Image (spheres, helix red, strand yellow):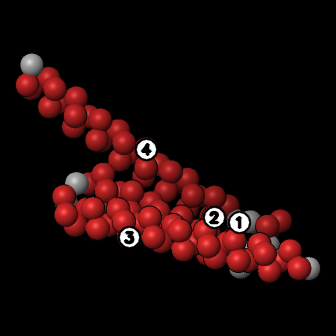
Amino acid sequence: MENDHVVTMIQGANVLACLAIAAFFLRSWRTTHDTFFLLFSLAFGMFAVNRCALAFVDERDEALSLYLVRLAAFLMIATAIVLKNRTRSRGLHDAG
C-alpha cells in the first residue's frame, strides 16, 4: 500500500511537468505566433489532463477514451512536425 503514495506522487509530478511544458510552448507561441508551438502546447495540455484522469482510474479499468486522448495528442504533435517541415521545404523551393 505504501507504493500507492509513491505512484500518486509520481503521477502528480508528471502532470506538473506536462503543464510546465505546455506553458513553455504557449509562451513561445505568443511570441512567434507559429502554429507549431500552439499545437505542441495543446498536445502537452492534453497529456496533463490525461495523466490527471489516470490518477483517478484503476489501471485495470483504463477506458478507451483515455487512449484516444493520448492518440489525439500524439497526432497533434505529428501534425505540427509535418506542417513545420512542409513550410520549410516550400521556403527552400521558393528561394532556389
According to the picture, the residue beneath numbered tag 1 turns out to be 63
Instruction: In the rendered view, tell whether residue 21 sits above or below residue 92.
Output: below
Disc 3 to disc 4, how far (Cα)? 19 Å
Circle nearer the N terminus (1, 4): 1
| In front: label 1 or label 4 | 4
| Contact between labelled residues 2 and 3, with CB atoms less than 8 Å apart | no
Disc 2 to disc 1, how far (Cα)? 6 Å
Tag shown at residue 82: none
Under mark 1, the amino acid is Ala
Locate residue 48, reporting x and y percent: 54, 70
Give the class, few, some or many, for how many residues have Cα within 10 Å of label 4's Cα (few <14, many ≥20).
Answer: some
Give the class, few, some or many, for how many residues have Cα within 10 Å of label 3's Cα (few <14, many ≥20).
Answer: some
| In front: label 1 or label 3 | 3
Circle nearer the N terminus (1, 3): 3
From the viewer's perspective, tell me whether residue 42 is left or right of residue 55.
Answer: left
| In front: label 3 or label 4 | 3
According to the picture, the residue beneath numbered tag 2 turns out to be 66
Under mark 4, the amino acid is Ala
Tag shown at residue 23: 3
Q: Quadrant of residue 20?
A: bottom left
| Contact between labelled residues 1 and 2, with CB atoms less than 8 Å apart | yes
Q: Write the residue at 26% across / 54% down.
A: 35
Q: How many marks?
A: 4
Q: Secondary structure at mark 2?
A: helix
Under mark 2, the amino acid is Leu
Locate residue 17, reporting x and y percent: 53, 68
| In front: label 3 or label 2 | 3
Circle nearer the N terminus (3, 4): 3
According to the picture, the residue beneath numbered tag 4 turns out to be 78
Q: Residue furthest left?
A: 95
From the viewer's perspective, tell me whether residue 64 is left or right of residue 44.
Answer: right
Disc 3 to disc 2, how far (Cα)? 22 Å
